[in-house]
Image (tube, grey):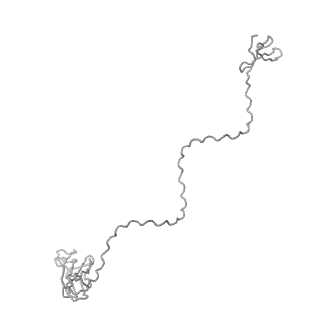
Amino acid sequence: MGSVAYAADGYVIKGCANKSNGSLRLLVPSDATCKSNEYPVQWNQTGQQGPPGPQGPAGPQGPKGATGATGATGATGATGATGATGATGATGAQGPQGPQGQPGQTGPQGPQGPAGASDPTFMTQLFNAQPGPLPLSTTYTSQGGTMMFFLSGSAWSTVNYIALGANLIVDGKNVGVAKLSINEPYSHKTFVANALVVSGLPAGTHQIQITPLTTYGERTDENDYYTLSVIEVVPAA
């Protein structure tokens, strides 16, 4: 029978088995061949894997690992519901004074006051675009000087080719007119303004009237407007 390597050759175990009784002996370097009544055998040193053993007890906690890298920013969450209104805070301190504002618009002119002792001229507005119809009446308190009345207005007519106008009556006396001639009827026409000088009236209150120039066809209404002003000059004492 050929020779067989000795028992331990790397991871292989070698030996000889008796042909008659099966007894086994290992080969060693000093006796590395099987006899004539033996046959060689060999097997691997590593056996078959056994079944898993039971889980051992948990080991102690390991040391803390290093901090990992920062993760990416997550998506913005939905807006939450509006919270309840908070309580009113305390009043803050008064702020500094602001800059001065722009000047306001000029107010309307007030009525003329009484003339001073040294003022010999008096100017008074008796009617200012006063709507009709005529007649219109008012009063004027004179200082006993010479007066100039400025009269203007308008009228319309139911007939054509007549003169339209207005009379200025002072204390029942006609002292002048403002008038014009028209061609077509049913159209409001403005008189030519006239300046009427009146003198010789005593100081005191006088009755002033504006009346129609004529009753033949002349008409006035709320669409006609009349203006009457007076300037009085009192001679120096």
Name the residue rendered at 48%, 66% in the picture: 93
Residue 17 lies, with reference to residue 136, above or below; the image says above
Residue 85 image offset from top left, x and y in percent: 53, 62
Residue 214 image offset from top left, x and y in percent: 19, 82
Q: Camera-side residue: 143 or 128?
A: 143
Q: Camera-side residue: 115 or 217?
A: 115
- In the rendered image, the quadrant that contains the C terminus is bottom left
Residue 206 lies, with reference to residue 33, above or below; the image says below
- In the rendered image, the quadrant that contains the N terminus is top right
**For residue 68, side relative to residue 37 (left or right):** left
Residue 4 image offset from top left, x and y in percent: 74, 14
Residue 101 lies, with reference to residue 2, above or below; the image says below
Q: In which quarter of the view is residue 180 placed?
A: bottom left
Total marks shown come to 0
Q: In the orientation shown, which residue stands out farthest toward the right?
A: 21
Residue 95 lies, with reference to residue 11, above or below; the image says below
Residue 28 image offset from top left, x and y in percent: 77, 16
Q: In which quarter of the view is residue 36 placed?
A: top right
Q: In which quarter of the view is residue 27 placed?
A: top right
Name the residue rendered at 54%, 55% in the picture: 80
Name the residue rendered at 74%, 35% in the picture: 54
Name the residue rendered at 66%, 40% in the picture: 63
**For residue 76, side relative to residue 98 (left or right):** right
